[in-house]
Amino acid sequence: MTVSVLSAAKRLAARSGWTLSNLELQKILYLAHMVHLGRTDGAPLVHGLFEAWDYGPVHPDLYHRVKIFGSSPVKNIFQSYADLPESLEREIIDEAYVKLGKLGSGQLVHITHRPGGAWETNYQPNQRGCFILNSDILKEYLGLANVPV
């Protein structure tokens, strides 16, 4: 089941106690999305596509919703979005938080900027709108010996 990126962000941010920044939310959700693609034969975790921006993969819908926080922790502005029910999607988001939630922005950027990875393959400096296809993300996942989530 594909979920709203804002419901997924709500779950992840709540799990952190509302301590994650926009950048951290983006990177952890991207990696959770990658794992979901890999574990479900290419079924996406969230609706829409991530884009290759200067600081890594970004989901534009999430970015525009939380950009008001800058680099500060994102607070709960997701009240109107449904909580995720018990599901594989919620399990993967929870697993991603447990494994990645304490790494910090720098380490998360390093992970998502793997040489030859989906972000690097689609990145064009100083441009937005460069979609990262789910097929490219899945290819990266399948090429990894050890997925960080």
Image (spheres, rainbow, N blue to C red):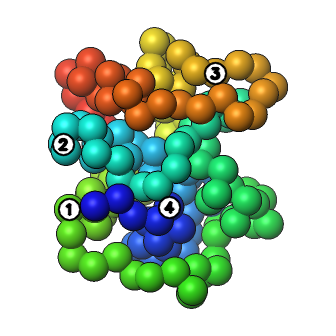
Q: Which residue is mark 1?
A: 88
Q: For the residues marked 4 and 1, what is the alpha-carbon distance in whole angstroms?
A: 15 Å
* Residue found farthest to the bottom: 79
Circle 4: residue type = Val
Q: Which residue is mark 2?
A: 39
Q: For the residues marked 3 and 4, what is the alpha-carbon distance in whole angstroms?
A: 21 Å
**Residue at position x 73%, y 59% from top?**
64
Whichever of callouts 3 and 4 sits on the residue coming sooner in the sequence is 4
Circle 2: residue type = Arg
Q: Which residue is mark 3?
A: 123
Whichever of callouts 3 and 1 sits on the residue coming sooner in the sequence is 1
User: Percent x, y for residue 122?
Assistant: 58, 21
Element under disc 4: helix
User: Percent x, y for residue 45?
Assistant: 35, 53
Q: Which quarter of the figure is the N terminus placed in?
A: bottom left
- The answer to whether residue 20 is left or right of residue 96 is right
Q: For the residues marked 2 and 1, what is the alpha-carbon distance in whole angstroms?
A: 10 Å
- The answer to whether residue 81 is left or right of residue 97 is right
Q: Nearer the viewer, residue 99 or 78?
A: 78
How many neighbours does mark 1 have within 10 angstroms: few (below 14), some (14-19), or many (20 or more)? some
Circle 3: residue type = Tyr
**Residue at position x 42%, y 55% from top?**
46
Circle 1: residue type = Leu
Element under disc 3: loop
Does the residue at mark 3 contact the one at mark 4 (Cβ under 8 Å)? no
Does residue 13 appear anywhere in the picture?
no
Q: Which residue is mark 4?
A: 5
**Residue at position x 59%, y 49% from top?**
59
Does the residue at mark 4 contact the one at mark 1 (Cβ under 8 Å)? no
Q: For the residues marked 3 and 1, what is the alpha-carbon distance in whole angstroms?
A: 30 Å
